[in-house]
Amino acid sequence: MLSRRRRRPPFPFPPGPKGLPFIRNLLDVPSKYHWLAYENWAREIGSDIIHTELFGTHIIVLNSSKVANDLLEKRSSIYSDRYAQIKDRKWVINLFPYCDKWRNWYKTFHAHFKPTMIHKYHPIEVKAAQHLLRSLFDTPEDFMQHLRRMVGRVSLSVAYGIELSPRNDPNMALADAALAGLGVAQTKGRIFNLVPFFMRLPWWFPGAGFKKDADMWKRKMDLCRDEPYEAVKRALEENKATSSIAASMLAGLPEKPTPEEILMTKALPSNATAALQSFVLAMVLYPEVQRRAQEEIDSVVGHGNLPDFGDEESLPYLKAVLYELLRWSPPAPFGIPHRLIKDDVYEGYFIPAKSLVFPNIWAIFHDPATYPEPSKFKPERFLDTTTPVPLLDVAFGFGRRLCPGRYFARNILWVAMASMLATFEFLPVTDAEGRPVPPLQEFTPLLTSGPMPFKCTIRSRSSRIKETIIATLQG
């Protein structure tokens, strides 16, 4: 029996754990908190670029802003591909391979979410924030659910013109199910996603039962995309459609649209993201930050009033809180892997074609040389112009694979943060003796990470705001 000999690289691979024959680093790479493991290896080995290998698939992790910029920005023409998924989510723009189809989709999506266009979504975002505040007044203990609902409300309204029902909305249930499936897939299916060899195994093979579950998750994700689209299509036919991205794209289709055009219309509005739970956690853990932000808001809009987007430039500390939130708890700490199109050499290290290249955003944002005391939530670091600002782009991608909805997501974050700070105090719960019990600073181990479920006390700062919100929403 002949065995294929491994090709000898012209230069050494970047440093990393040695590994074993055939399986290579299978036992080294953890199943969760990848960003922490690679950050530790980088520190131990003394290299900002780390190499591991799983059954012939090379994984390159970039642990500094310099290396990430050198490769993913300056060499983006060869570092902008994506890798194949176990169940290819062909309608999720961030997971597209780098090709003409992706470029067309990105251009169309960007047309709706570029900086000069996103102001038209401000009324929707403000209204969603008011619904959030009303929910927090009624049932503050369900704040995590209310935050998810606020993001979903904005996304569904902008994308499809859908108004969520007060409770148990089926569109929200579909979205939650799809996101839950995707989260499990990121953990259970990590080897299948990274190693092409495993993708060819039948579902009954030991350890490959995940592939059967993936069919169910894919169906839920497809329903999350297709059902709102069909609702917009019916509304247009009945002249009942409200303004939305899907409605405008459908109205602009030719008389006989191609399958590609229909798929683009279905898919593009579905890509939106935000992370607010880390903000609440930070406010509970750092009450001095909360007080300073509230004092700034009160001084600009007056105690008992809600800030609007027109107040943004007058609230520099709140802007610093937003920057620090993205740095302290990046929503995608390990990024989405890029796929190298052809062989490359960087600082004497060989990086073979088809390598999966991960930007370790967590390591970049927690570099003590750039951000002293990186584990602490210190917005004032971004009031000092000598401190590099973690630009929104870094938190949402690199090079040609920047998330096109990043400005939209940033606005959702800002208006929710400003509204909650103006209205509520976020405090730790207390024990039987009345002593505060701060929540643990623990985050989920998935590639999309947020705080572990925690409890806190949410107390109103102004009864007048509640009356104003109720009157506004009823009106």
Image: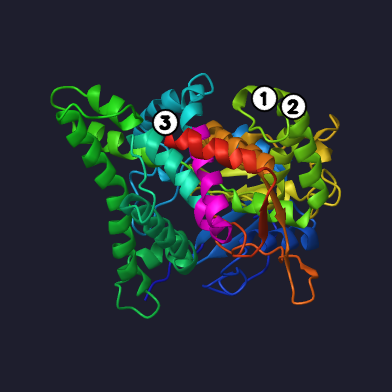
Q: Which residue is pictured at 70% across the width and 53% down the height?
A: 426
Residue 408 highlighted magenta (yes or no):
no
Q: Which mark is residue 435?
A: none
Any part of residue 150 in sight: yes
Residue 94 horizontal/vertical position (percent): 45, 42
Q: Quadrant of residue 106?
A: top left
- Which SS class for mark 1? helix
To which residue does mark 1 refer? Answer: 311
Q: Nearer the N terminus, badge 1 or badge 2?
A: 2
Q: Position of residue 253 (x, y in %)?
A: 22, 24
- In the image, residue 434 lies at what x, y percent? 79, 71
Rate crowding at label 1 as few (under 14), some (14 to 19) or many (20 or more) other CA atoms within 10 Å: some
Q: CA distance from mark 3 to mark 2?
A: 38 Å
Residue carrying label 3: 106
**Label 3, label 1: how many angstroms apart (C-alpha)?**
31 Å
Asked if marks 3 and 2 touch (Cβ < 8 Å), the reply is: no
Q: Nearer the viewer, residue 413 or 433?
A: 433
Point out the stretch of residues depicted in magenta.
125-146
Q: The residue under label 1 is which amino acid type?
A: Asp
Q: Is residue 178 left or right of residue 332?
A: left
